[in-house]
Image (cartoon, grey):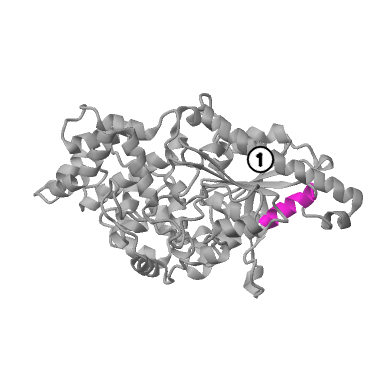
């Protein structure tokens, strides 16, 4: 989605009514839509006007929009082509009911690259990337773990798009799919991983690859899906690489301030002065905003797209900017250091607000038009709004000694807002009921196997990740300086040694899984099931 009109068109009816309240701020012509120049700011105003600020839970995704603007990526081929075949599978709408409407189907997109595959005769493996809350295109282009290791494993590469995103839309159109809670009711993680199972079984049959082991890979929400897929469908996937998967950030397993505590730690380690300036800036923004023409002054100073209506609009924007910088604090740029470098300079003045402006300019660029830059992730924003208001309830808040204003997560308020938006309340305990989460080590060491939980400890979402080995085959691979999903992004010249080593460790573990599988497969074909069942596999 490229602009606000497109988003508004596909919001559920209750959300459309909410947006009418702000139509004077975002005028829309009948025939054309306005520029997407300030979409991020629009969404900040919209969601903060109709919901609590903690409704805006930090985004989950292996790829941040700004990553796509890096010079070496801007020049990349944007269309999936060449060795990648774009395909569609006639997917079942509802895998878990047998009512007539459950048998409806939709076209689900998947992409295959068979260039390096060793073939069915050698039972060469299948690497499957499980798409998450975004169209598949950028994942195919920028997730490097699969193509970077395709030659080594002679692997068939499969990428599967998550239902309700990209081109994988039920009910014929996005407008119908997002029409109401009846059509959105099929939009959940259990249906998604069942989709993946169906497509992978279909691909194995089409390629006569019944004996080929499948390794599923995912990052962030997709990493959660990969780990859950291995637990729910062990007969389909031999193993899973779950990168930056905060599977413990549900049902109060993780302290709600875990995310923002790590953001604070990242900035404080970069610069004590930077940390203190940011911490002091919130009260300064409130102080200026309370003065006559204070909001006008802040609007001009921060070059906002539209005049600020409240101080919260600016503070929420800055909070998101700092969070993104910490979450996607990738080498060689290291955005946290970039922001702190700007804050520590004198280019914009020595007062607190001028230093904050300098930090924003260092990170975003000193654009003359607007710091609140375009956001092309609106499809993700709309889809994830439903997901977090139904089952993906992550109680992330700010309650302890961080550099941010006190802003705790309140489940009652969150439920009320979601009920207002969609007419149904969230199910905050469902994820841990269906997939588990409590007593993870006790449970997974008995019933889980072949899962890598990888995390970078500078990633705020690592606070909800599995950071210790659970068993010999359910393992944690951590890096002290790593950021969100960095290990599964494509290799770059200049990648630090610790990142190279992390990837090599993950590949070595997967090689061990596959070697053991081949040994078991050989024994099965030689001696039959009896010998395998007579010993522990």
- Local crowd at mark 1 within 10 Å, few (<14), some, or many (≥20)? some
**Main SS class of the magenta portion in the image:** helix
Residue occupying image coordinates x 46% and y 27%: 71
Please tell me whether mark 1 sits on a helix, a strand or a loop: helix
Between 102 and 129, the one nearer to me in the picture: 129
* Residue 143: percent from left, percent from top: 57, 39
Q: Residue furthest bottom?
A: 99
Nearest the eye: 233 or 168: 233
Name, please, the residue furthest toward the right. 527
Viewer-side residue, 194 vs 527: 527
Whole-percent x, y for residue 278 in the image: 25, 41
Q: Where is residue 408 in the image (x, y as percent from the top left)?
A: 31, 58
65 or 411: nearer the viewer: 411
Say above or below: 439 vs 356.
below
Quarter location, residue 263: top left
User: With respect to residue 488, does 445 lie above or below?
Assistant: below
Q: Position of residue 468 (x, y in %)?
A: 54, 47
Question: How many numbered circles does the render carry?
Answer: 1
- Asked whether residue 151 appears in the rendered view, the answer is yes
Question: Image check: 302 left or right of 46?
Answer: left
As drawn, is 43 to the left or to the right of 243? left
Q: Mark 1 points at which residue?
A: 509
Indicate yes or no whether the magenta region holds residue 299.
no
Q: Can residue 32 be seen in this view?
A: no
Residue in the picture at 28% in, 45% down: 403
Give the magenta part as a residue range.
197-210
Does residue 94 appear left or right of residue 269 in this picture? right
């Amino acid at each position: 989605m490229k602009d606000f009109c497109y988003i508004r068109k596909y919001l559920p009816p209750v959300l459309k009514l909410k947006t009418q309240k702000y139509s004077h701020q975002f005028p829309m012509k009948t025939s054309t839509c306005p520029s997407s120049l300030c979409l991020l700011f629009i969404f900040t105003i919209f969601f903060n006007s109709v919901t609590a600020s903690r409704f805006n839970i930090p985004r989950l995704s292996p790829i941040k929009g700004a990553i796509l603007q890096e010079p070496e990526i801007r020049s990349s081929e944007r269309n999936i082509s060449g060795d990648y075949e774009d395909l569609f599978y006639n997917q079942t709408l509802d895998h878990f009911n047998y009512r007539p409407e459950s048998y409806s189907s939709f076209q689900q997109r998947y992409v295959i690259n068979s260039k390096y595959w060793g073939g069915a005769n050698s039972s060469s493996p299948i690497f499957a990337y499980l798409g998450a809350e975004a169209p598949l295109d950028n994942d195919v282009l920028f997730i490097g773990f699969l193509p970077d290791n395709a030659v080594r494993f002679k692997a068939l590469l499969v990428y599967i798009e998550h239902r309700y995103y990209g081109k994988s839309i039920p009910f014929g159109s996005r407008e119908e799919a997002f029409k109401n809670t009846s059509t959105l009711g099929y939009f959940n993680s259990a249906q998604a991983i069942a989709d993946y199972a169906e497509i992978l079984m279909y691909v194995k049959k089409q390629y006569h690859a019944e004996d080929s082991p499948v390794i599923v890979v995912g990052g962030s929400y997709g990493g959660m899906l990969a780990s859950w897929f291995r637990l729910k469908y062990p007969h389909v996937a031999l193993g899973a690489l779950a990168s930056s998967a905060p599977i413990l950030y549900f049902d109060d397993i993780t302290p709600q301030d875990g995310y923002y505590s790590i953001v604070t730690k990242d900035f404080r380690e970069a610069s004590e002065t930077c940390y203190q300036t940011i911490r002091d800036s919130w009260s300064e923004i409130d102080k200026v905003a309370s003065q006559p023409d204070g909001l006008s002054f802040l609007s001009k100073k921060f070059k906002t797209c539209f005049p600020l209506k409240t101080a919260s609009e600016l503070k929420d924007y800055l909070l998101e900017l700092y969070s993104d910088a910490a979450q996607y604090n990738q080498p060689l740029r290291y955005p946290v250091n970039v922001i702190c470098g700007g804050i520590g300079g004198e280019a914009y003045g020595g007062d607190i607000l001028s230093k904050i402006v300098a930090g924003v300019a260092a990170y975003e660029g000193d654009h003359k038009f607007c710091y609140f830059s375009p956001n092309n992730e609106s499809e993700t924003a709309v889809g994830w709004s439903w997901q977090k208001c139904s089952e993906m309830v992550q109680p992330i808040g700010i309650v302890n000694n961080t550099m941010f204003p006190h802003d705790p997560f309140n489940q009652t308020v969150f439920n009320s807002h979601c009920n207002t938006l969609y007419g149904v309340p969230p199910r905050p305990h469902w994820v841990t009921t269906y997939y588990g989460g409590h007593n993870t080590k006790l449970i997974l060491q008995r019933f889980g196997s072949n899962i890598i939980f990888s995390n970078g400890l500078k990633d705020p979402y690592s606070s909800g990740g599995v950071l210790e080995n659970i068993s010999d085959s359910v393992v944690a691979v951590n890096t002290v300086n790593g950021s969100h999903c960095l290990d599964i992004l494509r290799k770059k010249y200049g990648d630090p040694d610790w990142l190279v080593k992390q990837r090599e460790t993950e590949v070595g573990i997967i090689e061990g899984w596959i070697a053991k599988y081949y040994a078991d497969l050989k024994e099965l074909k030689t001696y039959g099931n009896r010998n395998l069942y007579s010993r522990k596999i």
